[in-house]
C-alpha cells in the first residue's frame, strides 16, 4: 500500500472516530488536561528546548536543570496538589 494511501485511510478513520464518538457528550473535568500536558512535555522536548535554548546557559548540564523547566514542572505539581486538595483527597489513607 502506498504511504499516501495509508495516510489517507488513517485520516478518514480518525475523523470518523472523532465525529461519531459516543463519549463526546460526557462531562469530564478540566483537570484532566494537567496530566495530558505533563505527558506531552515528557513525550516531546523540554520547554527550554522548544524555545531553542533561549533560556539557560549553553554549557548548563541536564543535572543542573533549567529555571524555565523547573518553573513549569513546579506549576504543574502545584496545580495537581490544588486539584487533590479541592476534591478532599484522603491523605492519611494515601500515605498508609
Image (cartoon, helix red, strand yellow):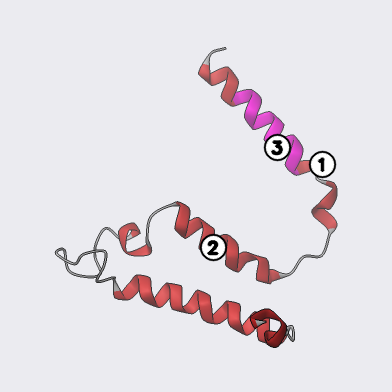
Q: Which residue is mark 2?
A: 37
Mark 2 residue element:
helix
> Would you say 50 lies left or right of 3 here?
left
Mark nearer the N terminus (3 vs 1): 3
Q: Is residue 56 left or right of residue 93?
A: left
Relative image position of residue 38 (x, y in whole percent): 52, 63
Q: CA distance from mark 3 to mark 2?
A: 23 Å
Q: Which residue is mark 1?
A: 20
Q: Is residue 77 above or below residue 5?
A: below
Residue lying farthest top?
Answer: 1
Q: Disc 3 marks which residue?
A: 15
Q: At 66% from the left edge and 71% from the top edge, which residue is drawn? A: 31
Residue 72 image offset from top left, x and y in percent? 43, 73
Stretch in magenta: 8-18
Camera-nearest residue between 24 and 84: 84
Dominant secondary-structure state across the stretch colored magenta:
helix
Mark 1 vs mark 2, foreground winner is 2
Task: Please name the residue shown 69% across and 87% down the image.
Answer: 92
Percent coordinates x, y for residue 63 in the rendering:
26, 67
Q: Residue 23: x percent and y percent?
A: 82, 52
- Foreground residue, 65 or 11? 65
- Do tag 1 and tag 2 residues touch (Cβ < 8 Å)? no
Q: From the viewer's perspective, is residue 39 above or below residue 89?
A: above
Amino acid at each position: 500500500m502506498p504511504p499516501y494511501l495509508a495516510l489517507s485511510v488513517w485520516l478518514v478513520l480518525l475523523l470518523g472516530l472523532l465525529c461519531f464518538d459516543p463519549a463526546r457528550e460526557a462531562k469530564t473535568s478540566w483537570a484532566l488536561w494537567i496530566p495530558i500536558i505533563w505527558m506531552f512535555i515528557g513525550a516531546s522536548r523540554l520547554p527550554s528546548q522548544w524555545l531553542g535554548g533561549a533560556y539557560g546557559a549553553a554549557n548548563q548540564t541536564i543535572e543542573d536543570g533549567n529555571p524555565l523547566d523547573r518553573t513549569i514542572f513546579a506549576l504543574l505539581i502545584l496545580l495537581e496538589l490544588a486539584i487533590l486538595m479541592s476534591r478532599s483527597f484522603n491523605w492519611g489513607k494515601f500515605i498508609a
